[in-house]
Image (spheres, grey):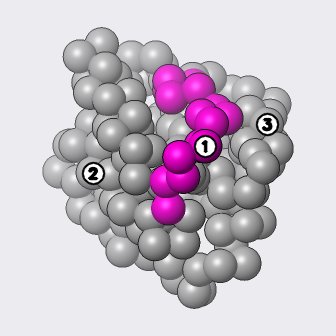
Amino acid sequence: MKAKDFLSRQQQERLVSAIKEAEKNTSGEIRVHIDDTCSGDPIERAGQVFRFLHMDRTALRNGVLIYVACGSKVFAIIGDKGINEAVPEGFWNEVKENMAGHFRKGEFAEGLEEAVLAVGSKLKSYFPYREDDVNEQPDDISFGNQR
């Protein structure tokens, strides 16, 4: 399956809306990237995409990437340095487990949407929304095997 066909247009629109909603509560930046395949470790691949999308260039280093390789049936959630220094180990485990549960049932859009909202909620306590907050990353979904 091609990454761009993984979610319907309506599902993509709902996911972008969820990203915007989640970011209303936090200064963190949330992105979703969908690849066709992942031939290696999904966390390493997510790190490559994270850097390619310049998510490591936010002022507070508080970007989060939800990475999915639909053809390989793998995913990862990674946060930038600012987040990783602030949160306890295993911080994303609950979000990952909920995503996996939805994915096992074929509920990919629901799993992603719920994950985005959960990430926003979790980030709120460490990186609350500020009056002077600037949206440093696009809210759209990125697709394809970015290097």
Tag 3, which secondary structure? Answer: loop
Q: Is residue 73 magenta?
A: no
Q: Tell whether label 1 touches label 3 (CB within 8 Å).
A: no
Disc 1 is placed on an element classified as loop
Q: Disc 3 designates what residue?
A: 54
Q: Amino acid at mark 1?
A: Asp
Q: Residues within 10 Å of mark 2 (few under 14, many from 20)?
A: some
Q: Earlier in the sequence, mark 3 or mark 2?
A: 3
Q: Amino acid at mark 3?
A: His
The residue at the point 46 percent across, 17 percent down is 4
Secondary structure mainly formed by the magenta segment: loop
- Kindly check if marks 3 and 2 are in contact, taking CB atoms under 8 A apart as contact: no
Q: Position of residue 97 (x, y in %)?
A: 34, 69
Name the outermost residue toward the front. 131
The furthest residue to the top:
9
Residue pointed to by mark 1: 132
Magenta extent: 128-142
- Check residue 68 in the rendering and tell me which mark sits there, or answer none: none
Foreground: 80 or 37? 80
Q: Residue at x 82, y 44 (%)?
A: 57
Quarter where residue 127 is shown: bottom right
* Count of numbered badges drawn on the protein: 3
Q: Position of residue 102 (x, y in %)?
A: 23, 54
Circle on res. 114: 2
Q: Percent x, y for residue 147? A: 81, 31
